[in-house]
Amino acid sequence: MAEILVIVESPAKAKTIERYLGKKYKVRASMGHIRDLPKSQMGVDIENNYDPKYITIRGNGPVLKELKSAAKKAKKIYLAADPDREGEAIAWHLAHSLEMDLDSECRVVFNEITKNAIKDSFKRPRKINMDLVDAQQARRVLDRLVGYKVSPLLWKKVKKGLSAGRVQ
């Protein structure tokens, strides 16, 4: 049984990283984002400080179930999503979904998939960077607000099916 669970975004990375870390590590892939705003509604509470309402992305239930099962068996969990705001948000969503302590030093980041870079990253884990998470959430909420308000106008004036989401 693996003592330490490491969660990365991609299954290809998971295999390589597991080989570099050794037998006491079990590396699993989240397959990217596991939660998002619902597609069928705004998903943002405008009246309550623009709070986003997240749900598990359709089709990711089995992935999340497998990660929860692996997390229950592990003594320690590290979140090793990509080192950008999207990766930080993925780590935060995983920590939330796995009911992890958000103040724990569970986040490891590396900029290259080499044995040395990966081993070094585990020597200095850190907390999830909430500034990066908040930046990603703000962008996502803005995408949704603009998309829901402007897309219908685009359909009337330009072409049906266009989306005003994905504001950068």
Image (cartoon, rainbow, N blue to C red):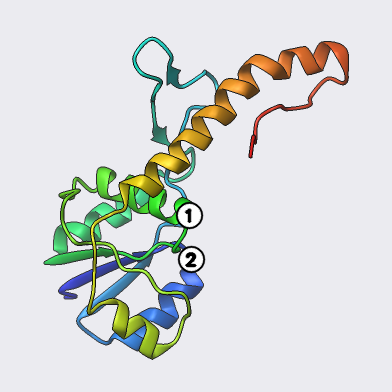
Q: Quadrant of residue 87?
A: bottom left
Q: Residue at x 73, y 27 (%)?
A: 163
Q: Earlier in the sequence, mark 2 or mark 1?
A: 2
Please, what secondary structure does the residue beneath circle 2 have?
loop
Q: Quadrant of residue 14?
A: bottom left
Q: Nearer the viewer, residue 43 or 122?
A: 122
From the viewer's perspective, is residue 9 above or below residue 157?
below
Residue linked to disc 2 = 10
Quadrant showing the C terminus: top right
* Relative side of 73 to 11, left or right: left
From the viewer's perspective, is residue 115 above or below residue 11?
below
Q: Residue at x 18, y 50 (%)?
A: 100
Please, what secondary structure does the residue beneath circle 1 have?
loop
Q: Residue at x 44, y 82 (%)?
A: 16
Residue 44 locus on image (x, y percent)? 44, 20
Q: Amino acid at mark 2?
A: Ser
* Relative side of 162 to 61, left or right: right
Query: Cα distance, mark 2 to mark 1?
Result: 7 Å
